Amino acid sequence: NKELLQSILKNQGADVDADQKRLEEVLGSVNYYKQLESDGFNVMKGAILGLPIIGGIIVGVARDNLGKLEPLLAELRQTVDYKVTLNRVVGVAYSNINEMHKALDDAINALTYMSTQWHDLDSQYSGVLGHIKTASQKAEQNRFKFLKNNLDAAKDSWKTLRTDAVTLKEGIKELKVETVTPQK
């Protein structure tokens, strides 16, 4: 259903934005602790007594926090990638459904037009039969002369109806439903 897909897209879009923001926050923290770890190693290289111990503590704190944040970062990246992919798939499905709706609407309009032509043709045929019945009482040489216009109009209607049926048949043959392959 088109509306359901649109709702999913809207809700997932908001979720992706929130997850993306959280991902950026965690990435900022990871970068901070990586820099802190690097700074700790630099402090450890110092020749002053006690600096290697302080640098070791800094490195230990940084690694402890990185050990907690890096799995969270990986999980958030996977979640964001999954949701972005899902949004693409739902977007393609939504687009395909839109195209199918349009194709079906066009087919319905063509069938409605054909139905109207059938009814017009039936009405003309009934009129012709009425004229024949009335004309049967007339003289033999003038019996069908006045029917020529009605018969010509009926002939033209049949030609138009046949052309429309062939066009509709070809249009239905061209209507394709393509499967959607998710993008990575």
Image (cartoon, rainbow, N blue to C red):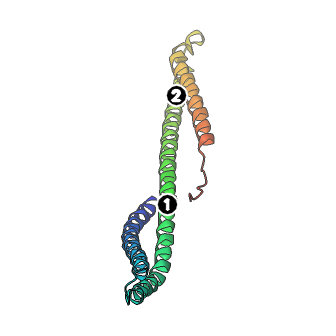
Gap in angstroms between the C-alphas marked 2 and 1: 59 Å
Q: What residue lies at 60% left-to-right and 56% top-to-bottom? A: 181
85 vs 126, nearest the viewer? 85
Q: Is residue 150 left or right of residue 27?
A: right
Percent from the top left, x then y, of residue 117?
A: 50, 34
178 vs 166, nearest the viewer? 178
Residue assigned mark 1: 90
Picture quadrant where residue 5 is located: bottom left
Picture quadrant where residue 21 is located: bottom left
Percent from the top left, x then y, of residue 91?
A: 47, 57
Percent from the top left, x then y, of residue 142?
A: 55, 11
Q: What residue lies at 50% left-to-right and 64% top-to-bottom? A: 86
92 vs 148, nearest the viewer? 92
Give the answer, above or below, for where 142 lies relative to 14.
Answer: above
Q: What residue lies at 53% left-to-right and 34% top-to-bottom? A: 122
Q: Are marks 2 and 1 in contact (CB under 8 Å)?
A: no
Q: What residue lies at 43% left-to-right and 83% top-to-bottom? A: 59
Of all residues, the one furthest to the top in this rendering is 141
The local crowd at label 1, few if under 14, some if 14 to 19, many if 20 or more residues have their Cα within 10 Å, is: some
Label 1 residue SS: helix
Residue assigned mark 2: 130
Give the answer, above or below, for where 152 lies relative to 108.
Answer: above
Q: Is residue 133 visible?
A: no
What's the residue type where badge 2 is placed?
Answer: Gly
Q: Is residue 91 visible?
A: yes
Of all residues, the one furthest to the right in this rendering is 173
